[in-house]
Image: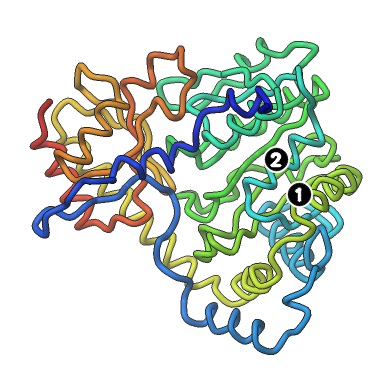
Amino acid sequence: MFNPNLTGTFAPPVMEARRWLEGVEFPPDRPLINVSQAAPADPPPEGLRAAIAEAAMNVPQAHLYGPVLGLPDLRAQVAGDWSEAYGGEISADQVAITSGCNQAFCAAVTTLAQQGDQVILPVPYYFNHKMWLDMMGIEAVPLACGPDMVPDPALAETLITPSTRAIVLVTPNNPTGAEYPEGVVRAFFAVARAHGLALIVDETYRDFDSRSTPPHDLFAQDGWDDTLIHLYSFSKAYRLTGHRVGALVTSAARLSEVEKYLDTAAICPNQLGQIAALWGMRNLRQWLAGERDEILTRRAAIEAGAGALPGWRLLQCGAYFAYFEHPFDIPSDQLAQRLVAEAGILALPGTMFMPADDPAGTRQMRIAFANADTAGITQMFARLAAWTP
């Protein structure tokens, strides 16, 4: 016997894409260009690795269970840094540390909704968000984005029913890269508050936003924590993907419920990962600024090269992502598999980010350039330009 909610959930897309590599040989003069996964492949900087090693060798409690909601020093650091960055007021008891940002999303949704409820999810969506809702028996109500890949708060309001519990935003967006304008995010907050809903804002890629000003002012709103649930990942900023460290910022009352979920699902977040995240926040601000500059350089290379790619249309670009419409008369899932063997490119098709009945996904492709430098991006465009069905 299996849980039908689980068997009815699609398989992990990244794992499916990796299987496309099986049995394919990539010659030395045409090595694989992997633009499928939005995670840095390089290890953390040496100083951060040394801090992890020091803690592993000399901090005995780093190997024990820790507080369910995370280390107090890290929670306080997040509260202080977020208050400064967003011009708001956040206290440590409004912060929880989670085993990655995916777990933060799962915890947030678990406090909000049950089987039969609804959550509004802009499409294209981050597939793990859709997967968790499906597993929980919660209906993901698709909110179509405009031509600029930015969702419309007024359209979202028309989708609200008595069963709606939350609206989800991801900005900068995965998969499209779209940076949602401050006014749009604030309008979503107003819609959610007016209807007594939660607004879940996932800012996993915040550190690579091109804007020099705060991306929104939600933390400066009076009583922000009655509506806003904010999610963050340390994985991308400090290359800590394998250590699984994320953050969830919301009301202290909601965190009392989150604690029940976290204690049951993982007991506590990874201690060494939390120590690493705290060290990174305190010591790597300048290094992280350099990482951001590099990503913005790659974004510029994508935008410059896209115009010379015959028939392809760049729909959006930002953070780690470029989202394209392809020109071929074949669905994107078939195109993605053919590009592996015939062009040495591993990218994800739009069908992985869209409902099965939405034909737009068959025309779209996501390029994740976290691990492709400008030379790699140039080579990728050359291969795409030369490829024909």
Say which of 27 and 171 sits in front. 27
In the picture, measured across the screen, residue 43 lies left or right of residue 308, that is right
Dot 1 falls on a residue whose secondary structure is helix
Name the one closer to the observer, 4 or 260. Answer: 4
Q: CA distance from mark 2 to mark 1?
A: 10 Å
Q: Disc 2 designates what residue?
A: 106
Label 1 near label 2: C-beta < 8 Å?
Answer: yes
Asked which quadrant contains residue 334, the reply is top left
Q: Is residue 127 left or right of residue 101?
A: left
Image quarter where the C terminus lies is top left
Residue 358: x and y in percent read 44, 14
Residue 136: percent from left, percent from top: 71, 28
Name the residue located 65 percent from the left edge and 22 percent from the top edge: 4
Task: Tell me if mark 2 has few (under 14), some (14-19) or many (20+) residues whose alpha carbon lies within 10 angstroms of its own.
Answer: some
The residue carrying pointer 1 sits among few (fewer than 14), some (14 to 19) or many (20 or more) residues within 10 Å by Cα, namely few
Amino acid bearing label 2:
Cys
Residue hosting label 1: 265
Residue 312: horizontal and vertical position, in percent? Answer: 21, 28
Residue 44 appears at what percent x and percent y? 48, 71
Where 239 sits versus 383, above or below? below
Residue type for callout 1: Ala
View extreme (front): residue: 1
On screen, residue 114 versus residue 359, left or right, reads right
